[in-house]
Amino acid sequence: MSHKPTERVLRILNLLSINTDGLTLTEISKAISVPKSTLYPILQTMTDMNYIHLGKDSFRFKLGISTYCIGSSYSQDEYMLEFVKPIMKNIVTEIKEICQMGILEGNNVLYVLKEEPEIGLDIRIITQVGKRIPAYCTALGKALLSSYDIKEVKKLYPTGLIPYTENTITDFDVLNNQLVAIKKEHLAKEYEEITMGLCCYAVPLESNGNVIAALSISIPSFRATQEKLNLATELLLNARIQFSNVNYK
């Protein structure tokens, strides 16, 4: 049984993390189904402690500096992330495309690290750390779900697999076949399932036999030549091996 007040605080933080323009008291109340009279003192306390910020002119709540500091502390001090960063930088140097790391949060991928080329691309992929996307329609997410059996996956999506593009997989059997293949080959693929014009390859990152994160390379479809896809595969599989050779406890 969850603790309701704590659950409400966490739901507020999650909600504001994906609504970067901020939300009003009314919008938050509707989104998490909590009366404004109950919600207001929670928001006031979070504001007083700088976990969220209320715009004086817009009257919209946004994440505050205390939340940022906690996130920054995790990113900077966690050894696992520090180990992965140079691997990601090397991947970007080699392939000149964006590289991202994600973890599974509920039924979503939470993006925790990103590396991208500094110059030289005519089109860039706009993403941000902290973004959440349904796992079933992303290469990162499929890599993370590869250790789950299909019954567990169905529990994560009780209302089914919602299509985001015409290419989104909406059949659990098709998804299961992909997850079985990923478990064998250690490589997940996604072609325009979440964003048209974008494909992505990813690998699960394991520690002590458990998938704890995933690493991906995203490539605009018009740049996704077979040569580049082969290079992405090689770089990601090598990164997976490097990661698996280090023990994280």
Image (cartoon, rainbow, N blue to C red):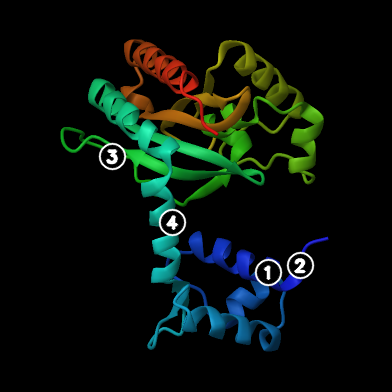
- 238 relative to 129, above or below: above
> Residue under circle 1?
6
Crowding at dot 3, Cα within 10 Å, few <14 / some 14-19 / many 20+, comes out as: some
On the question of residue 192 being in view, the answer is: no
Disc 3 vs disc 1: which is toward the camera? 1
Query: Where in the figure is residue 243, as x and y percent of width and height?
Result: 45, 23
**Mark 3: secondary structure:** loop
Residue at left 75%, top 70%? 4
Between disc 3 and disc 4, whose residue precedes? Answer: 4
Residue at left 42%, top 32%? 198
Query: Rounded to the nearest whole Å, what is the CA distance between mark 2 and mark 3?
Result: 42 Å
Q: Amino acid at mark 4?
A: Gly
The numbered disc on residue 124 is 3
Between disc 1 and disc 4, whose residue precedes? Answer: 1
Query: Rounded to the nearest whole Å, what is the CA distance between mark 2 and mark 4?
Result: 23 Å
Q: Quadrant of residue 25?
A: bottom right
The numbered disc on residue 71 is 4
Residue at left 40%, top 55%? 73
Between disc 2 and disc 3, whose residue precedes? Answer: 2
Q: Amino acid at mark 3?
A: Arg
191 or 85, which is in the foreground?
85
Crowding at dot 1, Cα within 10 Å, few <14 / some 14-19 / many 20+, comes out as: few
Between disc 3 and disc 1, whose residue precedes? Answer: 1
Residue at left 63%, top 17%? 183
